[in-house]
Image (cartoon, rainbow, N blue to C red):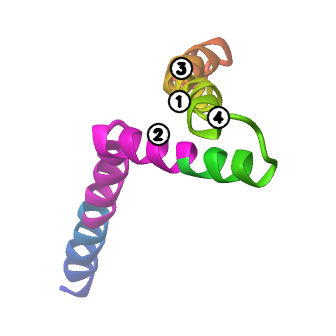
Amino acid sequence: MNSIEDLRQEVEEIKKRNKRVEADKAWETSATRKAALFVLTYLVVTIFFIAMQIKKPFVNAITPTIGFIISTLTLPQIKKWWIEKNKYLG
């Protein structure tokens, strides 16, 4: 009977792990994450531009922020291409 209980415990651990993985995947594709990346990147770049005494830091911070966001949005497609190219999907 002990082995059946061990199997049940393993199944429960796998279910918990799957829920964590699903939550991580949902976060990676969420609009909340994308918005947070945009806002935080914009704030950091703006603060840096202010410290460097660059003219119009609030306007000039938009360009690198958009560049960063575009690069993060294209990474899933690049990852998929890389996985298929390197035959990691079966």
Q: Rate crowding at label 1 as few (under 14), some (14 to 19) or many (20 or more) other CA atoms within 10 Å.
A: some
Disc sitting over residue 74 in the figure: 3
Q: Looking at the image, tell me whether mark 1 or mark 3 is earlier in sequence order.
A: 1
Residue annotated with mark 4: 56
How far apart marks 3 and 2 lie (CA) works out to 15 Å
Q: In the image, is residue 21 part of the stretch drawn in magenta?
A: yes
* CB contact under 8 Å: marks 1 and 2: yes
Residue occupying image coordinates x 61% and y 24%? 63
Compared to residue 19, the image places residue 80 above or below, namely above
Q: In the image, is residue 57 part of the stretch drawn in magenta?
A: no
Q: Rate crowding at label 4 as few (under 14), some (14 to 19) or many (20 or more) other CA atoms within 10 Å.
A: few
Compared to residue 86, the image places residue 68 above or below, namely below
Q: Secondary structure at mark 1?
A: helix
Residue type at mark 1 is: Ile
Residue type at mark 2 is: Phe
Q: Looking at the image, tell me whether mark 3 or mark 4 is earlier in sequence order.
A: 4
Residue 86 in the image, given as x and y percentages of width and height: 68, 18
Residue type at mark 4 is: Lys
Residue 47 in the image, given as x and y percentages of width and height: 65, 53
**Residues shaded magenta:** 16-42
Disc sitting over residue 69 in the figure: 1
Q: Looking at the image, tell me whether mark 4 or mark 1 is earlier in sequence order.
A: 4
Residue annotated with mark 2: 38
Foreground mark, 1 or 3, reads 1
* CB contact under 8 Å: marks 3 and 2: no
